[in-house]
Amino acid sequence: MTNHLAAIIRSDGIILGESLASQHAIHEEFGGVVPGLAKTAHEENIDKVIQSALQNANMSIEDVDAIGVTVGPGLEICLRVGCYKGRELAMKYDKPFVGVHHLEAHILMARLPPEKHDESITKQLTGDGIQSSYRAMEFPFLALLVSGGHCQILKCLGIGKYTIVGGTLDDSLGEAFDKTARLLGLPVGGGGGPAIEALAKDGDPKSVTLPIPMQQRKDCDFSYAGLKTSVRLAAERICAERGVERPDELPHQDKANIAASFQHIAFRHVEIRLGRAMELVQREDGIRTLAVVGGVAANKELRRRLNALCSDRDTPWEMSVPPPRLCTDQGAMSAWAAVERLMVGSSDSAEDQEVFARYPFSVSYIDGS
Ligand code: KG4
Ligand code: ZN
C-alpha cells in the first residue's frame, strides 16, 4: 500500500484509465518501507497519478460522477495524503464521496464483471437511467482474503455486511511469502510472492519436510509464524550440509526445493482451514460460492488448488477470483468499491472523512450507516 494508485472505472466495471507510481526503488534502497519517505513521495506524486489516470481515460475531473478513496486500514500518514486529495476534489467539484475500506475493496473485486460479458443481461432501469447491475458473483458468498497485511475468511452477506469466520493469529500468508523470499535472498521489490512462485516451479514440493500449522486446532484460524521458523531451520540445516554460511548462498536447486516445499505447506494450511469454513457455511447458510482475493490470490498454484478444492466436493462450489493483476493493490479496486457502495445508496461526507490505521469491519461505516 505504499504505491500511488488511481483509476477511473465505469459502473459496468469497465476500467477506463489507470495509473501507478511505484515506490519500490526508494524503499529497496533502505530495505523496507520508510514512512517519512513514503509520505513525501505521496505528496509529490498524487496530482501526477490522478492526472495520468484521467488522461488515459481521455477525461477531465469534471467528467467523473463520484470520487472514492481508501481510508483504512493502512499507514496513516500515506492514507491521509490520498484522503485529503479525494476530499478536496469532491468538495471543489461537488461530487459524491466514498471513503473506501481497503479489505472490502479487495473482496468486491471478485464481483467485477468479466471484461466480456453479455451486455443484454447487464442493464437495468434505475432512478438515474439505465445502469449495469451484472456482477461476477452475487451475495452471499464466502471470501478468502490473503494479502500482505491480512489473512482472513469472511462470510460476505452484502455491501458493508461481513462476518469474520477465521483470521490469523500471527503472520499473514503474504508476509510468510515475503519473509521466505528474504531468507532466500530473492528480490522482494513488489512483495516476495511472485519470486517464490517462480522459483517453486523448479523445485520438488515434497523434498523438504515442514509441519502443517495448527493441526490440533480444529477451527478456521491461521498461523504462519511457526512455518516461517521451520523454513529457516530447514534452510540452515541444508546450509550446514552444503558447507555454506547463509541460505541465499545455496545452489539454485536447494533454494527451489525450499520455495516449493514452503509454498506447498502454506497452501495445504489454507486448504484445510478453508475447507472447514466451507463445510460450516454450506451447512449453516447454504452458501456454495467462494471469492479468493488479495495479493496472494495472484498465485497460479493457489488458484489451481482452490479451484480443485471447489470442484472436488460432493456438491461442487463456484469460485470467483479476479484476474491476477487485479488481485494485488491497484487503483481500480478503490474506484470499483466506490461504485458498489454508491449503487446501494451508501456514501460518506467529504468534509468529515478521517483515516484509520486499524479499521475493523465492525467499526467502519458499515456499522454506522
Ligand atoms: O493485496 P496486496 O497487494 O497488498 C496488501 O494489501 O497487503 O498483497 C501483497 C502481498 C505481498 O505479501 C506479496 O508477496 C503477495 O501479496 N503476493 C503473492 C503473489 N503476488 C503477490 N504471493 C504469492 N504469490 C504471488 N504470485
Ligand atoms: Zn491490499
Image: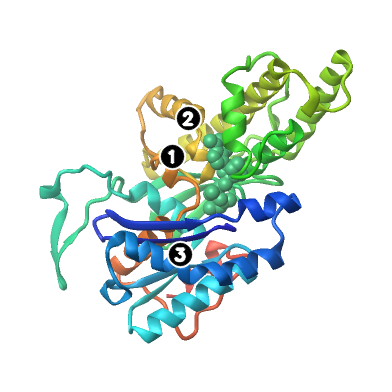
> CB atoms at circles 3 and 2 under 8 Å apart?
no
Is tag 3's residue or tag 2's residue first in the polypeptide sequence? 3
> CB atoms at circles 1 and 3 under 8 Å apart?
no
Between 6 and 293, the one lying in front of the other is 6
Kind of residue at disc 3: Val
> Where does label 1 land, which residue?
324
Question: Whole-Å distance between the Cαs marked 3 and 2?
Answer: 30 Å
Q: Secondary structure at mark 1?
A: helix
Question: Whole-Å distance between the Cαs marked 1 and 3?
Answer: 22 Å
> Where does label 2 land, which residue?
300
Residue 334 lies, with reference to residue 251, above or below; the image says below
Q: Position of residue 144 (x, y in %)?
A: 50, 43
**Mark 1 CB lies closer than 8 A to ligand 1:** yes
Left-right relation of 309 to 131: right
**Mark 2 CB lies closer than 8 A to ligand 1:** yes
Image quarter (top left, top right, bottom left or bottom right) of the N terminus = bottom right
Question: Whole-Å distance between the Cαs marked 2 and 1?
Answer: 8 Å
Is tag 2's residue or tag 1's residue first in the polypeptide sequence? 2
Image quarter (top left, top right, bottom left or bottom right) of the C terminus = bottom left
